[in-house]
């Protein structure tokens, strides 16, 4: 049940504090985090 507790804690943090990064909409790609340091070069499934 640890995974459920982590999910609930994450949702609670998102609701109370908002996202850690601002987001912008990119036409044809969807939403992406501004300044996200992760490599997201893999094609998106949509």
Image (tube, rainbow, N blue to C red):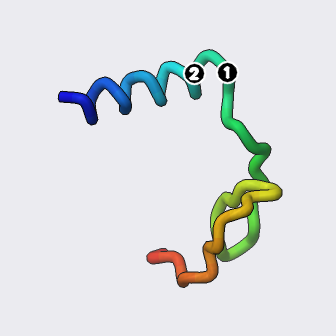
Q: Are marks 2 and 1 in contact (CB under 8 Å)?
A: yes
Judged from the image, the secondary structure of the residue bearing numbered disc 1 is helix
Residue at image position (57%, 21%) is: 15
Q: Is residue 5 left or right of residue 25?
A: left
Q: Residue furthest front?
A: 2
Residue at image position (52%, 76%) is: 44
Considering depth in this image, is 2 or 13 the residue closer to the camera?
Answer: 2
Considering depth in this image, is 29 or 9 the residue closer to the camera?
Answer: 9
Q: Position of residue 45 (x, y in %)?
A: 45, 76
Q: Position of residue 43 (x, y in %)?
A: 54, 83
Judged from the image, the secondary structure of the residue bearing numbered disc 2 is helix
On residue 17, which mark appears? Answer: 1
Q: Residue furthest top?
A: 16
Disc 2 target residue: 15
Binning the other alpha carbons within 10 Å of mark 1 as few (below 14), some (14 to 19) or many (20 upward) gives few
Marks 2 and 1, Cα distance to the nearest angstrom?
A: 6 Å
Q: Position of residue 30 (x, y in %)?
A: 64, 64
**Above-or-below relation of 13 to 46:** above
| Quadrant where the N terminus is found in the figure | top left
State which quadrant residue 4 falls in: top left
Residue at image position (62%, 16%) is: 16
**Above-or-below relation of 6 to 16:** below
**Above-or-below relation of 15 to 46:** above
Q: Is residue 29 left or right of residue 34?
A: left
On residue 1, which mark appears? Answer: none
């Amino acid at each position: 049940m640890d995974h459920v507790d982590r999910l609930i804690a994450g949702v609670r943090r998102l609701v109370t504090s908002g996202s850690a990064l601002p987001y912008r909409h990119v036409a044809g790609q969807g939403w992406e985090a501004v300044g996200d340091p992760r490599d997201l070069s893999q094609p998106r499934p949509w």
